Amino acid sequence: MYVRRLPRPGTLARIGAVGVAICLGCSGHRATAPAVPSYTEAEHLDSLAQQAGASGLFDRSRLLTYPTAVLAEGITPKTVSISVDGAPVSYQVVGAELLQTSAGSTNGPPTDSVFVIVAWQGANVDELIYTQVSTPDTIDDDAVLADTVANENLIGGTATAALATASGNCAFLDLTTAAELVQGATCSRATITAGFHLEYSPIAGNTDSLFVLTSQAIPGVRLVLPASTGGADLLARLRQIVPRRPIPSVR
């Protein structure tokens, strides 16, 4: 049984002037490093998110925030095959573990965490699949985006995510739309084992219904959220604890 919870409108949608800077050694957790290939794509997605926000397209703006944040940490996405209504389709995929500790650092015991798995295709993100998972298999939030139309009518689904490895530092590119997720967080490069089997009720402008990613290792980050500047309650704000009807498993 899965209960889905939705973020509050406006969370992760800080749209303003583009803020671009490489953060070297920020808060003692960023590696000094030259620009990496993923920065170009991160800047592009950041621009798309800002354009969406300026046009009042909140769903597209907030969903683009997640891959932008991971790519801005210097992570190169993995190309995977996702079954869409029975046909294989190539997507890029990344993941993130957002971890809250009692001390707001790697030294404190974990108090809360979620995994975000996001896959997309097209140079301008024509399609995007987003799943937020609490360990081991609770779907907190989800959406499938077709251009500007987000479908959140999940009628059946399973999803799993777990941290496989986390080591090394991240090279951080400071971008406007990713700020709330990454500013001040302690970042480690990570490998996350994840998969999903999601079924949606089609809607106008977004008619694909069944999405399957076989469980596999995907690249990502482990972000320990800071205790200061509101980081301690970010996970609660992402979830917003809005009860939804139980989501039946897809067999």
Image (tube, rainbow, N blue to C red):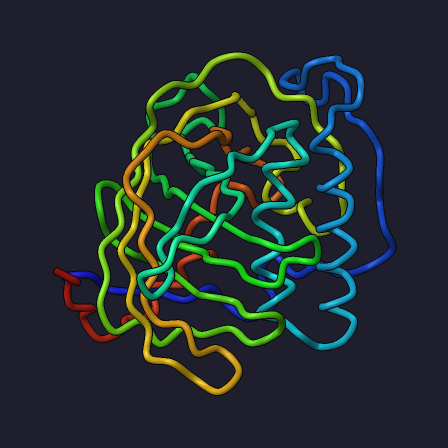
Q: Residue at x 33, y 48 (%)?
A: 213
Question: Which quadrant of the view contains residue 20?
Answer: top right
Q: Residue at x 26, y 44 (%)?
A: 160
Q: Residue at x 45, y 19 (%)?
A: 106
Question: Which quadrant of the view contains residue 32?
Answer: top right
Question: Which quadrant of the view contains residue 203?
Answer: bottom left
Residue 37 in the image: x percent, y percent?
A: 73, 28
Question: In the rendered view, does 80 fall on the left or right side of 174?
Answer: left
Of residue 168 and residue 12, the one placed in the foreground of this image is: 168
Q: Can you say whether 199 is above or below 181 in the image?
A: below
Question: In the rendered view, does 143 fall on the left or right side of 128?
Answer: left
Residue 86 in the image: x percent, y percent?
A: 31, 61
* Number of numbered discs on residues: 0
Q: Can you say whether 24 is above or below 8 in the image?
A: above
Residue 9 in the image: x percent, y percent?
A: 55, 70
Q: Can you say whether 23 is above or below 182 in the image?
A: above
Q: Can you say whether 70 is above or below 245 in the image?
A: above
Picture quarter with the N terminus? bottom left
Residue 132 in the image: x percent, y percent?
A: 38, 52
Q: Residue at x 37, y 59 (%)?
A: 87
Picture quarter with the C terminus? bottom left
View extreme (right): residue:
17
View extreme (bottom): residue:
204
